[in-house]
Image (cartoon, rainbow, N blue to C red):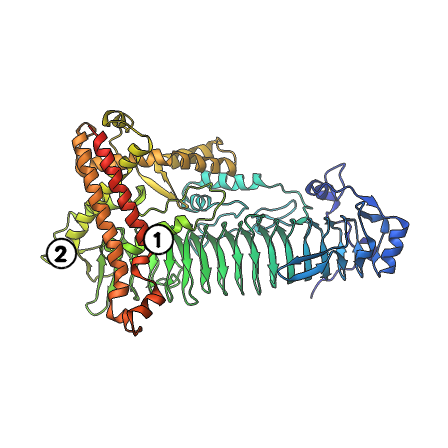
Amino acid sequence: MNIIQKHPVNNLGYNFVEKKYIPKGKDEYYLRNTQNQNGISYRKLTAGEIEALIRNRNTSDDWNKIFVSRQFNPELVRNCKFHGLIRIGKLEPFYLEFHNLRMPVGLYNSTIISCDLGNNICIDNVNYLSHYIIGNDVMLVNVNELATTDHSKFGNGIIKDGEDEKTRVWIELCNEAGGRSVIPFNGMLAGDAWLWSKYRDDEALLNKFKELTDKRFDKQRGHYGKIGDRTVIKNCKIIKDVWVGTDAYFKGANKLKNLTVNSDEKRRSQIGEGCELVNGIVGYGCRIFYGVKAVRFVMASHSQLKYGARLINSYLGNNSTISCCEVLNSLIFPAHEQHHNNSFLCAAVVMGQSNMAAGATIGSNHNSRAADGEIVAGRGFWPGLCVSLKHNSKFASFTIIAKGDFPAELNIPIPFSLVSNDVAHDKLVVMPGYWFMYNMYALARNAWKYVDRDRRTEKIQRIEYDFLAPDTVNEIFDALKLLQKLKPSATGTAEVTGWENTGRKTELQKVPQCIKIFKELIQYYGALELMNHFIKNKFVDFANFKKTLSAKVQRSEWLNIGGQLIQKTEIDQVKRDIKSGKVKSWDELHLFYRHQGTAYDADRLDHAYTSLLEIVNITPKQFTPALFKQLLQQTLDTKEWMCKGIFDSRAKDYNSPFRKMVYDTNKEMEKVMGRLEDNSFIQQQVAEFEEMKTQVKSLLKKVK
């Protein structure tokens, strides 16, 4: 039976907070008065204004409970019902226009309960508006319900006075069984989510994370919802317990409940037709359109959900886009792309710069009676068309997976590999170093693209997009140890075990070529960092340059913390600082990220130098001007090889007869695809190579 309670009608709009939850000496409006910072000076209605309001078919349980600004015009309030304490800003004879929606300033055809309204707003046909503080120049048109409860949390995973711990909202990241759950909060970064979900064996750390989250918010009941200046909400059904920033735009949403929607004049967030969002945080500059369903989620800034996408129990990193498909129980680092209706991602950590193709099914391919396990994919993860993977699986950075139904769990430890399922010969085939041999254009362009498309205005975490960085270089070193133990055949193939959970063989292809390329890449990474350091600091000779290089000889270990690369020793230290109470808030942890971002150039230089010493097998004393000159020349050779690889891999699209056959003439192809010679990215790479040649020529004169 539905329990429908009856109360006196003159109580409507009052007793928002039960008396037992109101501090001594306060009234039910104490939080509302603190929240309202609009600076408007309110006064009581005059007798003439009350008369005009009644004449315009407005009602109130108590006209003395309506307060207005000096420039209030009662003729702009028509057919409204007011209950409780109402405060109204100035109403002037204007109309507001936004995207061809033109509505007169004023309050029309609405029921308004205990709200504070800013200056020159338009409220028309809002059937139920309750307990909101609304900014200036806001448009609210055709909304069924816009209300706040006394225990509103606005998407944050907290509990209010008198609530049971069982009511707390958690996000079950990385694992369907909830073993890596985290508490969402406004401002949560991908690094926060990873640290909290990863170290599950450290109970003291987990308790501190929960404590930091609870300290971030108060437990008091009675916070009002807020709608910031210039926000437009039209043709929506249910909006409940939603905090909205300035300049947001909602149109045609079905249901928005328990959310924070961050938005401001430079980072406007939008929610469109048919969307249903419950228990979540929407970051600045997000776009959510066309039938999206999201439940228990965090969307970092400038991410997008479109075309019926489903995002459930997941964290979506900055500058990511998910369209059409379904994502469950996943932690996704920045710059993720997933655009296809029949792609599926479940119970995974995807570490950024990733792309999911159509038909890819990552998870929910059960191989036990339990819930799905986990998939951990390093950055640059790219499962191709109709790839089906089983839990648990793990992939090194920049793994690309060819179309296929992979029959068992995988552990691919070598980065930049192409993984294929050879059904005809019943074997797993891995080509390490594939990207550098056959797809250099995509690899290099993606690194450039992600930097170019990073729209964050507040870069708390310094995201690494370069494919050669401390994490991938360390993976290459580990790969070399593995590859150099093998004894490849005359065709360059070798067999390995432990990469697939089956009895069939795993074949590595082009092993000698990969070893050569990996060694060259490490040397290129190290020498290029040293070259840039020399140029940036304008050293006049080698001696002064070498004095600034670290005396370390041990290559450091690095972790990918939500897309930001940080040395493991620093992460170990900050975990100790959190547990000891030295780090007292999430903001202080975010300050740690900033400091690590500031130190990154120097730390990366140290890593590059020690990597170079290790790959050429020398001590710091043996790093001489003559050797540096030699390395600079080899760096030029590698850059030239890369530029050629970029051009050649793109040229395949122009030279392949199967690509050309849909065009009758070369001119038609060029009109459709553009001329290869005009490709802006290729031109950019050629220009960079020419600049490097000039720089190296100049450096060679100084290195003595």
Residue 83 is drawn in which quadrant? bottom right
Residue 492 marker:
2
Rendered residue at 38%/66% (across/down): 358
**Quadrant position of the C terminus in the picture:** top left
User: What amino acid is found at the position of numbered circle 1 in the picture?
Assistant: Asn
Left or right of residue 616, residue 545 in this image = right
- The residue that label 1 is drawn on is 446
Q: Secondary structure at mark 2?
A: loop
Residue nearer the viewer, 432 or 643: 643
**Quadrant position of the N terminus in the picture:** bottom right
> Can residue 478 be seen by looking at this rendering?
no
Left or right of residue 82, residue 458 in this image = left
The answer to whether the residues at label 1 and label 2 have Cβ atoms under 8 Å apart is no
User: What amino acid is found at the position of numbered circle 2 in the picture?
Assistant: Gly
Residue 514 is situated, as x and y percent measured from the top left of the image, at: 19, 51
Residue 404 is situated, as x and y percent measured from the top left of the image, at: 29, 66
Residue 347 is situated, as x and y percent measured from the top left of the image, at: 41, 56
Asked if 676 appears above or below 27 in the picture, the reply is below
Q: CA distance from mark 1 to mark 2?
A: 29 Å
Left or right of residue 431, residue 594 in this image = right
Q: Nearer the viewer, mark 1 or mark 2?
A: 1
Instruction: Name the N-terminal-most of marks 1 and 2.
Output: 1
Count of marks placed on residues: 2
Quick one: label 2, few (<14), some, or many (20+) residues within 10 Å? Answer: some
Residue 107 is drawn in which quadrant? bottom right
> Can residue 518 be seen by looking at this rendering?
yes
Residue 659 marker:
none
Rendered residue at 71%/60% (across/down): 103
